[in-house]
Structure formats: C-alpha cells, structure tokens
Image (tube, rainbow, N blue to C red):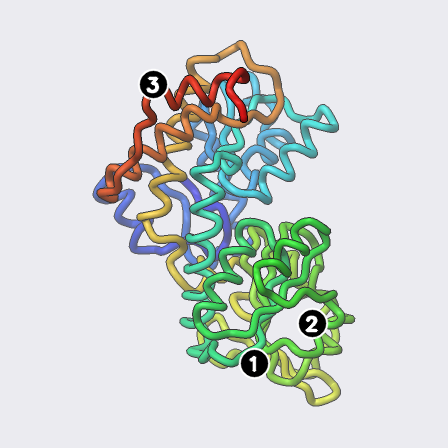
C-alpha cells in the first residue's frame, strides 16, 4: 500500500497496517512530491498483477517510467472521478495499455461515497481547520457533480447560504432547482465567505477571483488534486504569509486584504480530517473487491479501455448494505415483473 495524496495519511493507521496486519505500507503524513513518488515506486517494486488507484498516479507511473511492468498487469481499478477523467483521456489517445475498471462510476460508489462521504468529511475538515460557524455564511460550492451536491446539501443543513458555480448547463439548472443560487465564479467571488472546489479541473479559483474576494475569505479544495485553486499564483501576489493553526494559512495581499487557504489547497477532508466514514467506504470497497474478481476472471479477454461494473453487481452491493443497515427491500410479485417486461398492457 501507498498514499494516494501527500496529505492523506494518518500515521497511526499506516503504522498499524504494518505492525498488526503485516502489509508493507509506504506513506507518511505531509510527504513532499519526491517522497510521494518514492513511495509509489516502492509499492510497484512488489511487482503487482492488479493495481488499485485513487487519482491514477500509480497507473500514470506505470505508463511513463515503469513500462516494463505493464506486461504483468492484469488490470487496474480507479476509485475517484479525477482519476477516471485522466484514464478516459488516456484511452481516447490510445495511450492506455491495461484494462481499467472505473469503480467510481458504479452507482453504489458515486451516489453514496461521493455525495454523503465527501459532503460530510469536507465540512468536517473545514471545521477542524477553522472552527468556523457555518450558519449564516455564504458558502460557494464550485462544481455540482455528486461531490458538489453532497457538500452543498450538508452546508445547507448547517444553515449556510449556498451558492453553486457550475459550467455544465444541466447541472447548473439542477442546482437552481435544488434551491441554491447559481452564479458565475466572478459573481460568487464578491460575496463568498467560504469557497470549496470539487470540480476535478484546474484553476477554477484563479487570481482574478481572489482579487474580487472580501477580506477574510476562506478557500478549501475537496477535489483530488491541488490544482483547483491557483495556489502558485497566490504565492506570487502575497505580501506576507503565516500559519495561523494547523492546515490554516493566512495570506495578506498588497492591498492589505487577507485570504485564508486550508490544507495547502489539497483534499481538505483528508488533510485536516479523517476522510469518509467507514460506513460509506464499505460500499466503495465492495465494488473494488468485485472489480478485482472481474479483472481476474476476464484476464486476457479485455481491451485496454475503461470499463464500468455491470449493474447487477451494483444491486448485490446495495442489497448487502440494506441488510447490514437493517432495512427492508420490497419484492415484486410475478404479476408485477410480467407487467414491467410487457408492452401489451396499457390504458
């Protein structure tokens, strides 16, 4: 095992994986890029036949500097939206040399992990880093995919006035119908108290937006990579910078305005909190387990492209979770099943 993000590790968990479970684990909290890639290489030194990725860095490394190992790879799994975007781009360019299962795209993953897990853990990270009262604040959620939906929903529940910024017309319309104000980033920058990026895209909060923000504005990212907020640009225009508390940095601009950045612009739910609760990650990891089985059973039969698990497996995972939660599931009668599969009955 190795970390999928430089700030994602809980050192006591990594230590327990080694000590109590005898799993070679290469991860420390706060590793720099050099150490991060050293750990990725250390994991690949074990010559895996199946890789499980969160952000596609491991697969990218295999395709760049470890190409000799590709022939031994049965396939890979991808856990997060950002990684799936990268892998689909590789497949489109015919650069992908192994089959990949996008476990992120299973309904029992993105509908629950992304929405409820990210929604709760993102706010948990913001609270731990700032101890801010969310009620009454203008919270700008940049991106209204499943993660953005979850963050917006949870922020609304805490009493925030939620604004959504979205570049997709259908998602923007959905956010409006869900009761949120929908604006451009330039409009939202002027009124926001707290900004959270969850897009999987680059520089969705850029310098032009920061210059419009009010003094005291807080920026956090819950997308996988630290490129969603233009941190490098902020470093160039700052007058001074100081660390207020762990994972909370204050940037003073030349105008005297102060802007706060959480967790270095990295995943705030992992940097300042503990990520998703296990009670939602079990759905994701059930899909990962089924995906490993799918790859092994179909060894040598799959093309080098991105696959989604069959819906029948989604149903298995959902039924197991319902049972674990003590919830009931209605059973259709034979008459109802016939009706749903027939075109002859009508008005």
Q: Which of marks 1 and 2 is nearer the N terminus?
A: 2
In front here: 40 or 302?
A: 302
Labels 2, 3: front one:
3
Q: Which residue lies furthest to the bottom in this view?
A: 256
Tag on residue 20?
A: none
Q: Does dot 3 land on a helix, a strand or a loop?
A: helix
| As drawn, 292 above or below 185 | above
Q: Residue at x 60, y 16 (%)?
A: 303
Q: How crowded is mark 2: few (under 14 residues within 10 Å), some or many (20 or more)?
A: many
Label drawn at residue 334: 3
Element at label 2 = helix
Image location (x, y in percent) of residue 277 = 34, 53
Please, is residue 109 above or below residue 238 in the view? above
Of mark 2 and mark 3, the one earlier in the sequence is 2
Q: In which quarter of the image is the C terminus?
A: top right
- Is 332 on the left-hand or right-hand side of 216? left
Q: In this view, does 345 lie to the left or right of 46?
A: right
> Which residue does the image show at 53% across and 69% down from the upper left?
262
Does the residue at mark 3 contact the one at mark 1 (Cβ under 8 Å)? no
Say which residue label 1 marks. Answer: 242
The residue lying at 34 percent from left, 18 percent from top is 334
Q: Nearer the viewer, mark 3 or mark 1?
A: 3
Question: Within 10 angstroms of label 1, few (less than 14), some, or many (20 or more) residues?
Answer: few
Q: Distance between the residues labelled 3 and 1?
A: 68 Å
Q: In this rendered view, identify the residue nearer to me: 300 or 318.
A: 318
Q: Which residue lies furthest to the front in this view?
A: 347
Q: Can residue 345 be seen in this view?
A: yes
Residue 188: assigned label:
2
Horizontal and vertical percent position of residue 300: 52, 10
Alpha carbon distance from label 1 to label 2: 26 Å
Residue at 58% from the left image edge and 29% from the top image edge: 66
Q: Residue 57 appears at what percent x and percent y?
A: 57, 40
């Amino acid at each position: 095992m190795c970390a999928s993000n430089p700030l994602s590790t809980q050192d006591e968990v990594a230590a327990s994986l080694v000590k109590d479970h005898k799993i070679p684990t290469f991860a420390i909290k706060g590793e720099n890029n050099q150490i991060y890639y050293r750990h990725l290489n250390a994991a690949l030194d074990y010559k895996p036949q199946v890789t499980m990725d969160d952000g596609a860095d491991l697969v990218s490394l295999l395709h760049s500097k470890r190409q000799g190992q590709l022939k031994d790879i049965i396939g890979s799994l991808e856990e997060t939206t950002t990684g799936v975007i990268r892998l689909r781009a590789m497949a489109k360019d015919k650069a992908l040399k192994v089959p990949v299962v996008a476990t992120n795209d299973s309904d029992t993953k993105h509908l629950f992990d992304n929405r409820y897990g990210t929604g709760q853990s993102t706010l948990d990270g913001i609270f731990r880093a700032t101890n801010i009262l969310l009620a009454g604040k203008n919270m700008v959620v940049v991106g209204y995919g499943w993660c953005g939906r979850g963050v917006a929903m949870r922020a609304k529940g805490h009493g925030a006035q939620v604004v959504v910024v979205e570049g997709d017309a259908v998602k923007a319309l959905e956010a409006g119908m869900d009761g949120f104000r929908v604006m451009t980033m330039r409009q939202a920058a002027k009124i926001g108290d707290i900004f959270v990026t969850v897009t999987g895209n680059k520089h969705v909060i850029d310098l032009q937006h920061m210059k419009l923000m009010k003094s005291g504005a807080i920026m956090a990212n819950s997308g996988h990579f630290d490129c969603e907020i233009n941190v490098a640009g902020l470093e160039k225009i700052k007058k001074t910078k100081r660390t207020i508390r762990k994972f909370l940095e204050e940037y003073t601009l030349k105008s005297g305005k102060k802007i706060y950045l959480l967790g270095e612009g990295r995943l705030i739910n992992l940097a300042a909190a503990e990520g998703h609760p296990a009670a939602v990650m079990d759905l994701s990891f059930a899909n990962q387990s089924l995906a490993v089985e799918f790859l092994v059973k179909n060894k040598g039969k799959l093309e080098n492209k991105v696959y989604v698990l069959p819906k029948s497996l989604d149903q298995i995972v959902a039924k197991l979770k319902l049972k674990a939660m003590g919830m009931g599931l209605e059973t259709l009668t034979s008459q109802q099943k016939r009706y749903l599969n027939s075109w002859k009955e009508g008005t």
